[in-house]
Image (tube, rainbow, N blue to C red):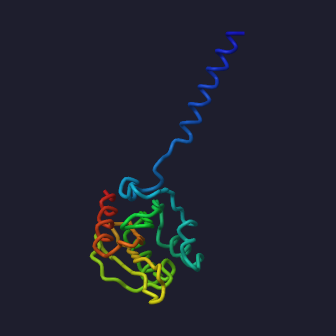
């Protein structure tokens, strides 16, 4: 009886160890903003395959086709949410393409589709790291009392596109720019 109890215990330990290894969190896709960048906000990370990225568009099929033709490889996203004095919602992405040309094609698409992300987007002059950058701000509606300052930007480092969407009561171009530099620092 005692021997079978020991065998059962060893089997349970072995099964538990295997399950732990399989469910251990891993970093999906290329590195993006680390969880420690905004420690006071809840965060979640996910990989962005072609289908997930195409779902960003109000018309997913044309974006899916552009991504395929542009050599989209993989991406990752970390989303932060909660309430702080500066940011309430942040989405940081790193998107890998086969070549810089493909990254530029995606950025050109982003430059024409700011409204897909913000609803009412206006071009914003922000100092961005990298090359081929585009930037937007949420156009003020004038009557919305709870509207938060919101910024969206994307830029390229080689064949990698980095994008950042951030909103919050204390969000401004300088704070957004500092967060963009943090994201840019994740590309090696």
State whether residue 89 is above or below residue 18: below
Q: Is residue 187 left or right of residue 23?
A: left
Q: Is residue 12 left or right of residue 188?
A: right
The answer to which quarter of the image holds residue 32 is: bottom left
State whether residue 181 is above or below residue 10: below
Quarter of the image containing the C terminus?
bottom left
Quarter of the image containing the N terminus?
top right
The answer to which quarter of the image holds residue 124 is: bottom left
What residue sits 43% from the left and 67% below the top? 88
> Residue reaching furthest right?
1
What residue sits 53% from the left and 68% below the top? 53
Q: Between residue 164 and residue 187, name the one nearer to us.
A: 164
> Residue reaching furthest top?
2
What residue sits 43% from the left and 86% below the top? 140
Place of residue 146 in the rendered image (x, y in percent of width and height, measured from the top left):
47, 78
> Residue reaching furthest front?
145
Place of residue 64 in the rendered image (x, y in percent of width and height, measured from the top left):
56, 73
Place of residue 7 in the rendered image (x, y in percent of width and height, measured from the top left):
66, 16
Place of residue 133 in the rendered image (x, y in percent of width and height, measured from the top left):
34, 76
Q: Between residue 55 and residue 89, name the one nearer to us.
A: 89
State whether residue 143 is above or below residue 36: below
Tally of marks: 0
What residue sits 61% from the left and 20% below the top? 10
């Amino acid at each position: 009886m005692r021997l079978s109890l020991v065998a059962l215990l060893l089997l349970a330990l072995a099964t538990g160890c295997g399950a732990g290894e399989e469910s251990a969190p891993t970093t999906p896709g290329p590195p993006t903003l680390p969880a420690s960048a905004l420690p006071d906000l809840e965060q979640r990370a996910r990989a962005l395959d072609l289908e997930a990225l195409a779902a960003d568009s109000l018309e997913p099929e044309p974006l899916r086709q552009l991504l395929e033709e542009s050599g989209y490889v993989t991406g990752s996203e970390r989303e932060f949410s909660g309430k702080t004095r500066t940011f309430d919602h942040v989405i940081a992405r790193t998107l890998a393409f086969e070549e810089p040309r493909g990254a530029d094609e995606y950025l050109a698409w982003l430059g024409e589709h700011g409204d897909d992300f913000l609803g009412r987007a206006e071009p914003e002059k922000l100092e961005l790291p990298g090359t081929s950058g585009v930037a937007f701000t949420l156009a003020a509606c004038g009557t919305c009392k709870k509207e938060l300052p919101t910024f969206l930007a994307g830029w390229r480092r080689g064949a990698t596109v980095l994008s950042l969407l951030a909103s919050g009561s204390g969000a401004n171009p300088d704070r957004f720019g500092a967060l963009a530099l943090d994201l840019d620092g994740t590309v090696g």
